Amino acid sequence: MPGSFFGIEIGLRGLRAHQQALDVVAHNVANASAPGYTRQEARMQATQSQSVPGQAGQFGSGVTVYEIQRMRDVFLDDQMRSEQASYGKFNALKKGLDEIQTFFNEPSDLGLGSVMDKFWASLQDVANNPESDGFRRTAVQAGEALAEAFRHTRKQLADLQLSITTTVREQVSEMNLLAQQIAKANSQISEIGTIPGEQPNDLKDKRDLLIDRLAGLVKINATADTTSSVSITIGNVMLVAGASAKEAVFSDAGGEPHLLVGGAEVITPGSPGDLGGESGGLLNLRDSILPAYCGDLDTLAEKIVSETNALHRAGWGLGDAVHVERDFFSGTDARTISVSAALSSDPSKLAASRNGLQGDGSVALQMARVKENLVMRGATATFSDFLRGVVGRLGVQAQEAQRFVENETLLIKQIENHRQDVQGVSIDEEMSNMVRFQHAYTACARIITAFDEALSTLIERTGVVGR
Amino acid sequence: MRVTTNSLISNLLYDLREAAGRLETSERELSSLKRINKPSDDPVGTVNALRLKATLFDVDRYVANIQDAQSWLNATEGALASLAQVATRAMDIALRAGSGSLPESSRDALAREVDQITREAVDVANQSFGGRSLFAGYSTGVRPVTTTEVNGQVTAVAMHDDSGQMIRQIGPDSTMTINYCVTGVARGAGSSLFDALISLRQAIDANDRAALGNAVSVLEDHHSRLVGLETETGAKDSRLATTKERLDQMKLDLIALLSQVQDTDVAECTVRVQAAQNSYTTALAVGARIIMPTLVDFLK
């Protein structure tokens, strides 16, 4: 027989275990809406039973909570992080492309296409009335409006590129902050983890939340190692290993974007645009999508300038005694295009005529009809065709990004549901557990009372014969 | 599968967001009456819409050019008609002057009349429209016909030879010349209408029967040429009228096409907005129900 008071000890162990279990239930319920919280379960196990010589069987000795298990599925975490990176990338692309769409402002009467049409129409007016000062001034104004529309849109694209660089730098700072915090969490968890029986569950939750946030910024690989630390790599460069975090630095040395982590270049298949996550998406936007549209605008502007000027130089201005070659536009691309100073100060110098006669508007008519010429894309498209092609491509890219974002949102939602399946707190479940543990607690208390009564019989009532 | 409070809420939120998103899209479509508000709404439709708009803009341009051309042609036609009339009257006078014997005073009067007609013809040839000479080609600031006078009578006429063509674009590939040069109208120096009139006056003054007879046939020649030009102007005008009609019809068709591509079908969209509103309110109502009760409510 293990001892007189052993029954009470069993009851006590039961009380302790179930009280702990109730504590865990309370913790779960309290944290039910905390983001990133993983529910915990108290794992109970019978304590070591004892054998008594001469007696059959083993004596059970009660219960103990041997582990508070954190119900987490690491595989789902990996999936979620990967999809977060994709979502971040496509969301950044979508937002950027939406902004570019507002810059181009098509289809509307205020877009570049309409401004171009109005410019050529004003030249037709000059062709019909070459002597008129009013129509000439209008044509010069329309030319200035066209130049300004080009410059403005081009500047907006360039400004977006600059602001992306700033945003990426900020994101890299955030990456560094997160990396440091993860490293610190790693060291704390390792320390506590060495103490047997201790499970730093809430610290692990905090670390997982940090890693999730990091995964949205850039594509990472998180692997757990034997010391219950999580090491993080970007591409094939280690960012966090155990308790130490390297510093990530972003630079545009040599005109190319570089992400250096602890001095080592992050090498991912392809270009830094494959960084994934928001940063990857933003860099893709800055370095391949925006330059394409800037290039298109520049090409269009440059062609309009050169074609118009070629015709204009052959013409005579109003009141020219001899032929003077003048340009209509000055500038070489969408950043620099403007109406030449000679014309804006004196619209009568608009070369409308072929030979100096005031009623001749044939050169103006040629300049107006340049819109019909196939001068773009290797002589297969007009200026307007070209612009429409650019707008169409923009629409397709934006639509595609939109679809990817919608897909990723759905995927993430599904994965999150699976995660919640595993790690989420169900109030109903906790309530029924609570009832269960409550009853068990009460029962254990009862057991103690029973043993107490039994012992009191033994203590108080034995050996009083003859008193 | 465990259904946790969080997953219930997040599903509800996701569905509410989707319903609200659909509602917002439908409402925006209805209030702007445009199906396409940015290129990503319908990339192919956007390109089509832009192309149609550009064509519409061009059509308006051609119609404006046609109207400009028509007014110029009308003025020209009027001037040519006046010149033809001048030739007719001159022929009359020539016949009268050549018939039988007229007293000198009558002949003088006729000569004076011819001189007046000559000046009238010069005035018509120098006519301008909107501040620009009708018959001076590109030299629209110049009066194409100048006269030399001796003793109050016109003795010689000089014409400014400028055959510049005023061209108006009336279609994507078609243009029209809308003016005549004075040398085309009155014919070249030495044998122009003015020269014929001056010769007539001189013939009347000299009572030269042979010259008078010659003058009639020369004037007849000028007359039929002028009538021919007048007819040609009329034909150009009617070609412009037909083109304009065609362009007006084309414009209506283009507007209808453009509307098909980019405008909202109001009836359909209103129904969609209604449906979206309904689904949103239903989602809200259902959501409120499913998230409330837990076991807590039922335990003592």
Image (cartoon, coloured by chain):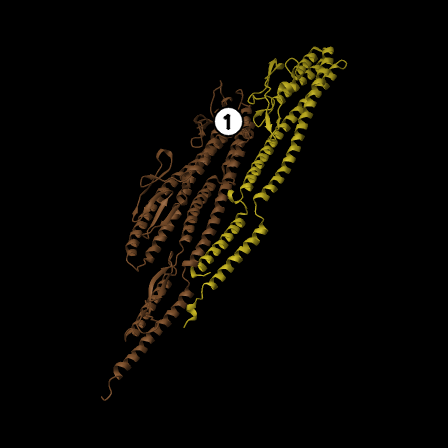
Which quadrant is home to the C terminus of chain A? bottom left
Q: Which residue is mark 1?
A: A307
* Residue at horizontal 46 percent and vertical 57 percent from the top: B11
Callout 1: helix, strand or loop?
Answer: helix
Q: Please provide percent x and percent y for residue A199.
A: 32, 58
Front residue of this view, candidates B260 and A320: B260
Chain identifier, colour yellow: B
Considering every residue shown, the one lying at the far right of the view is B100
Q: Position of residue A401 (x, y in %)?
A: 48, 44
User: In the image shown, does A285 or A56 lie closer to the viewer?
Assistant: A56
Q: Position of residue A329 (x, y in %)?
A: 46, 28
Position of residue A387 relative to residue B229, above or below, is below
Of all chains in the rendering, the one displayed in brown is A
Outermost residue, bottom direction?
A466
Q: Is residue B218 visible?
A: yes
Q: Measuring 70% from the left and 10% from the top, which residue is drawn there? A: B206
* Figure quadrant of the N terminus of chain A: bottom left
Is residue B116 something that shows in the picture?
no
Nearest the camera: A382 or B148?
A382
The amino acid marked with disc number 1 is Glu
Query: Hey, which quadrant is residue A191 in on the image?
Result: bottom left
Where residue A29 appears, as percent x and y from the top left, is 37, 63
